[in-house]
Amino acid sequence: MSADFIERATDWQRPPDGMQPHDWPLWFRFRDAHAADYLAFAFNVRLPTLTPPFVPNDPTAAAFVDALAKRVDVVAIRGDGAVDLIEVARRPTPGSLGQLLLYRWLWLRHQPRAVAALVLLGLDIDADLRAFAESLGVRVVLV
């Protein structure tokens, strides 16, 4: 796992690296309501893939591969060392849910820390998608 930015939960005063500006208000509302639940957060966390891409000694190719990397919006670290993987989307879609499920699968293949929860954080969500996500154990948080 590599994070572009990690900080203690109590220090989150600036917009998270890698997060779209239109998602910042959602993140700040979640942070304000749940900061006490976590020790730290890592933002824009790059996940290892099954087959690392071949990148020749070409900075342009390396930048291209990096731009296509799978990244979790937020990895929230709990006091017991477990983590929550959080996907932030104004209106989560089936694609948002699919991303989160893939992120958990990749995380568990490469990380020693258990995933405590998957969290879809948004402003609004389709009722069917919410019911489906919750049936899979995904926590839906609307702020």
Image (cartoon, rainbow, N blue to C red):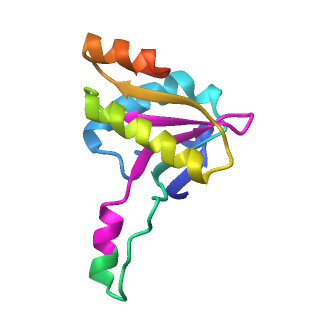
Q: Residue furthest bottom?
A: 57
71 or 131: which is nearer to us? 131
Residue 12 located left or right of residue 56: right
Residue span colored magenta: 63-88
* Drawn side of residue 112 relative to residue 17, left or right: right
Relative to 68, does residue 20 appear above or below in the rendering? above
Most foreground residue, 58 or 10: 58
Residue at the spot 51% in from the left edge and 55% down from the top edge: 5
In the rendered structure, does residue 10 fall within the stretch colored magenta?
Answer: no
Q: Where residue 52 sits: x, y (%)? A: 44, 68
The structure residue drawn at horizontal position 38% and vertical position 71%, both measured from the top left corner, is 53
Give how far across and how far down residue 51 sits, in percent.
Answer: 44, 65
In the rendered view of the protein, which quadrant contains the N terminus? bottom right
Residue at left offset 58%, top offset 45%: 108
Say whether residue 75 is magenta: yes
Asked if one can make out residue 70 in the rendered structure from this viewpoint, the answer is yes
- Indicate the quadrant where residue 83 lies: top right
Residue shown at 47% from the left, 48% from the top: 43
Q: Position of residue 131 (x, y in %)?
A: 36, 12
Along the line of sight, the residue nearer the viewer: 116 or 78: 116
Q: From the viewer's side, name the closer residue of 120 and 106.
A: 106
Q: Could you tell me which quadrant the C terminus lies in?
A: top left
Residue 42 in sight in this render: no
Q: Quadrant of residue 41?
A: top right
